Image (tube, coloured by chain):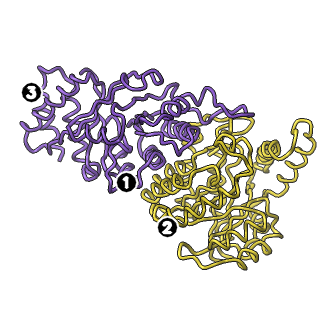
């Protein structure tokens, strides 16, 4: 539990919401903002990898410290080179804050595309041309995870069940060596009015994180919550510290943190 | 957003300076901010223009953000449309999209294409953008880049705006505009306008423009390596081309700049793009140039007629 990161994932959000969220999350002290087709609502049909990267590029200039997570499905209608270039641009423009969440597909070409994207900066095979893909990301290695679940449907099913493990050690581990485990949680975050309810929430979240051996938990949130700085402060100032502390310290830290948070309102 | 061809800059700095320049131009009254595309350019020219546009739109309030020229044939139209939708979400009504054909073989090869495919793909993607993806494109204005007559006619036929590059001589502007106007069809999408791009540097005090001329010469040597066959063996041709191109740049005192751009205004263009951040010009110097142009050239040109000037 030590040092577990707390991030947010806006569901059914548009690019403007993502930009505002990144700025607010940065100010509040949230560790990361994830965005992508994972949380796509059918009503937000505009969202694809291109939309995600453009939205996060907007978020990059309005934030300084928050990590920016891009959930990408690497669909076959987009050249891997283009995805690799976008990744380089976003990592450079954000000062090395990009993280990748790759959503695997059972479609046969997916593994090859993922390998091409992630290997782009060392070599790019174009017949007759000695091609160097630029810009290279600012980070020596952009952190990446691969979602468990073979398709968008199962991902969404996992979300509806309450939690989904983003597990780098299952599918395609032979292509992309995973180094982290990220838990996406759809547990409803209490509004902070009832300290016992909040305590139950954090306790359940701690159980989820421990069960998944995760080092990051991503709370999926609504667009309304994404625009609510008070809510983000609750996550960063109350939930995050209580999530990270020794279990024996939870009661008193929860009490103190909630009091702090209420005085701020 | 580009790093120098011959002396690459730290890319993190390039993006930070782009934000600063955009905010300055926004504050000082320029109307639009344009950015060009090249892919797999080893020096790091930004290949993702819609992302760059979003990056700058997020930290500005008023100025239009304009990816241009985006090399439409080597992108997929749906992706372009969705990227436009994202920028429009962030900065409603502030996106103008400059589109062009592209010519570098390597850029097409990297997309699994050949240069021969550029025209049919351009047309197909354009039809997609204004047809099946019109809802995603929203109020995005389309600006057609090109210096050939056929390009001006095409811009007119689609009811789009005309973007003449620095390759169009100023004395050819009236004829190109006439071609465009003669072919112009009404468009519910946008009010069609015409523009001319020029490399510009206003000198002031100790800055006599020699540094900028050197940078420009390097830039055109780079372009020449794509336009001249066997560029190393034909270096004389490349050097000649670069010298000619530097000669078309508008470098001089603010009064000189105004005087040289005035014919374009009289020819009826609605917008002048002042290209100032070329070949890795020093970021602080670009700051100073934006301020100088805003204080001198901008008001002088605006007093001639109501139109736009873009850095």
Residue B159 locus on image (x, y percent): 62, 73
Residue B71 locus on image (x, y percent): 65, 52
Q: Are marks 1 and 3 on the same chain?
A: yes
Image quarter where the C terminus of chain B lies is: bottom right
Residue corresponding to mark 1: A14
Secondary element at image label 3: helix
Residue corresponding to mark 2: B139
- Front-lying residue, A256 or A244: A244
Kindly check if marks 2 and 1 are in contact, taking CB atoms under 8 A apart as contact: no
Q: Earlier in the sequence, mark 1 or mark 3?
A: 1
| Chain letter, yellow | B
Q: Colour of chain A?
A: purple
Residue corresponding to mark 3: A251
Residue B68 locus on image (x, y percent): 63, 56
Residue B85 locus on image (x, y percent): 46, 58
B291 to B161, vertically: above or below? above
Q: Chain of mark 3?
A: A
């Amino acid at each position: 539990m030590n040092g577990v990161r707390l991030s947010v994932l806006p569901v059914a959000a548009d690019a403007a919401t993502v930009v505002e969220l990144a700025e607010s999350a940065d100010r509040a002290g949230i560790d990361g903002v994830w965005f992508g087709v994972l949380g796509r609502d059918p009503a937000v049909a505009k969202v694809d990898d291109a939309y995600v990267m453009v939205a996060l590029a907007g978020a990059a200039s309005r934030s300084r410290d928050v990590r920016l997570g891009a959930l990408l499905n690497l669909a076959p209608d987009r050249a891997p080179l283009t995805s690799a270039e976008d990744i380089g641009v976003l990592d450079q423009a954000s000062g090395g804050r990009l993280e990748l969440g790759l959503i695997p597909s059972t479609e046969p070409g997916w593994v090859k595309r993922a390998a091409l994207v992630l290997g782009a900066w060392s070599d790019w095979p174009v017949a007759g041309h000695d091609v160097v893909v630029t810009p290279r990301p600012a980070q020596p290695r952009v952190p990446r995870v691969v979602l468990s679940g073979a398709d968008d449907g199962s991902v969404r099913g996992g979300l509806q069940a309450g939690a989904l493990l983003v597990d780098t050690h299952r599918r395609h581990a032979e292509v992309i060596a995973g180094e982290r485990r990220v838990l996406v949680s759809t547990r409803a975050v209490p509004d902070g009015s009832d300290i016992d309810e909040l305590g139950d929430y954090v306790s359940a979240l701690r159980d989820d994180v421990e069960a998944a051996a995760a080092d990051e938990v991503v709370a999926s949130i609504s667009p309304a919550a994404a625009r609510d700085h008070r809510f983000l402060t609750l996550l960063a100032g109350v939930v995050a510290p209580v999530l990270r502390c020794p279990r024996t310290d939870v009661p008193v830290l929860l009490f103190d943190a909630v009091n702090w948070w209420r005085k701020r309102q | 957003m580009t790093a120098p061809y011959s002396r690459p800059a730290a890319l993190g700095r390039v993006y930070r300076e782009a934000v600063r320049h955009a905010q300055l131009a926004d504050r000082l009254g320029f109307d639009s901010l344009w950015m060009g595309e090249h892919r797999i350019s080893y020096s790091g020219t930004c290949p993702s223009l819609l992302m760059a546009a979003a990056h700058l739109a997020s930290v500005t309030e008023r100025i239009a953000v304009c990816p241009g020229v985006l090399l439409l044939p080597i992108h997929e139209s749906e992706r372009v449309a969705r990227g436009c939708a994202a920028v429009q979400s962030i900065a409603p009504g502030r996106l103008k999209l400059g589109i062009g054909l592209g010519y570098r073989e390597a850029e097409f090869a990297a997309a699994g294409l050949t240069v021969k495919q550029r025209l049919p793909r351009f047309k197909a993607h354009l039809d997609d953008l204004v047809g099946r993806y019109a809802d995603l494109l929203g109020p995005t204005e389309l600006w057609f880049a090109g210096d050939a007559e056929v390009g001006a006619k095409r811009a007119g036929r689609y009811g789009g705006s005309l973007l003449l590059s620095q390759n169009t001589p100023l004395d050819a502007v009236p004829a190109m505009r006439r071609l465009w106007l003669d072919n112009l069809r009404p468009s519910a999408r946008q009010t069609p306008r015409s523009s001319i791009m020029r490399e510009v540097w206003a000198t002031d005090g100790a800055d006599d423009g020699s540094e900028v001329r050197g940078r420009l010469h390097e830039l055109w040597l780079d372009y020449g390596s794509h336009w001249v066959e066997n560029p190393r063996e034909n270096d004389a041709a490349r050097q000649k081309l670069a010298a000619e191109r530097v000669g078309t740049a508008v470098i001089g005192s603010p009064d000189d700049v105004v005087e040289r751009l005035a014919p374009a205004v009289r020819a009826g263009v609605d917008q002048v793009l002042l290209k100032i951040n070329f070949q890795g010009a020093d970021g602080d110097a670009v700051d100073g140039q934006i301020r100088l142009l805003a204080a001198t050239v901008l008001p002088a040109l605006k007093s001639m007629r109501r139109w736009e000037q873009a850095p």
